[in-house]
Image (cartoon, rainbow, N blue to C red):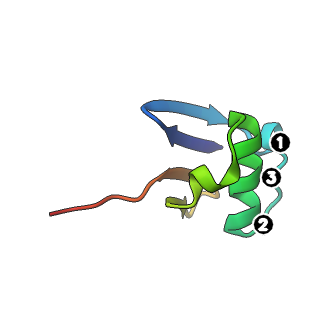
Amino acid sequence: MVHIRFEGRSIDLSENQLGIASGMNDVAVKERVARHLDVRSNRLDSYVIDRRPSGDLIIRPEAVYG
C-alpha cells in the first residue's frame, strides 16, 4: 500500500497502480507518484518517503517543527 499526502489530499493506492517495484529508490518512487498526480516531479522534491516495516510507503511533506 502507498499512502500519499499531497496538497491537503490523502490518496491510498497499491504499488501496482503506480508501477512501483520493491527496491526502487526514492527518486524513482517520486517520479511514479508525480506521474499519477499529473504534476512535475520536482513538486515532490521536499517530500519524505517513510518505508514502514510492513512494506507500506508513506509519501508526505517534510515535517517542520518549531
* Image: 42 above or below 15: below
Q: Is residue 57 visible?
A: no
The residue carrying pointer 3 sits among few (fewer than 14), some (14 to 19) or many (20 or more) residues within 10 Å by Cα, namely: some
Q: Residue at x 46, y 35 (%)?
A: 7
Image quadrant where one finds the N terminus: top right
Q: Quickly name the residue at label 1.
A: 16
Q: Residue at x 33, y 58 (%)?
A: 63
Image quadrant where one finds the C terminus: bottom left
In depth, the one of 13 and 63 nearer the eye is 63
Are discs 2 and 1 less than 8 Å apart at CB?
Answer: no
* Amino acid, disc 2: Met
* Amino acid, disc 1: Asn
Q: Position of residue 15 (x, y in %)?
A: 76, 45
Q: Residue at x 73, y 70 (%)?
A: 25
Quarter of the image where one finds residue 23: bottom right
3D distance between C-alphas at marks 3 and 2 = 7 Å
Q: Secondary structure at mark 3?
A: loop
Are discs 3 and 2 less than 8 Å apart at CB?
Answer: yes
In the displayed structure, does residue 44 sit left or right of residue 7?
right
3D distance between C-alphas at marks 2 and 1 = 13 Å
Q: Quickly name the residue at label 2.
A: 24
Q: Residue at x 79, y 62 (%)?
A: 22
Q: Quickly name the residue at label 3.
A: 20
Q: Which mark is residue 62?
A: none
* Amino acid, disc 3: Ile
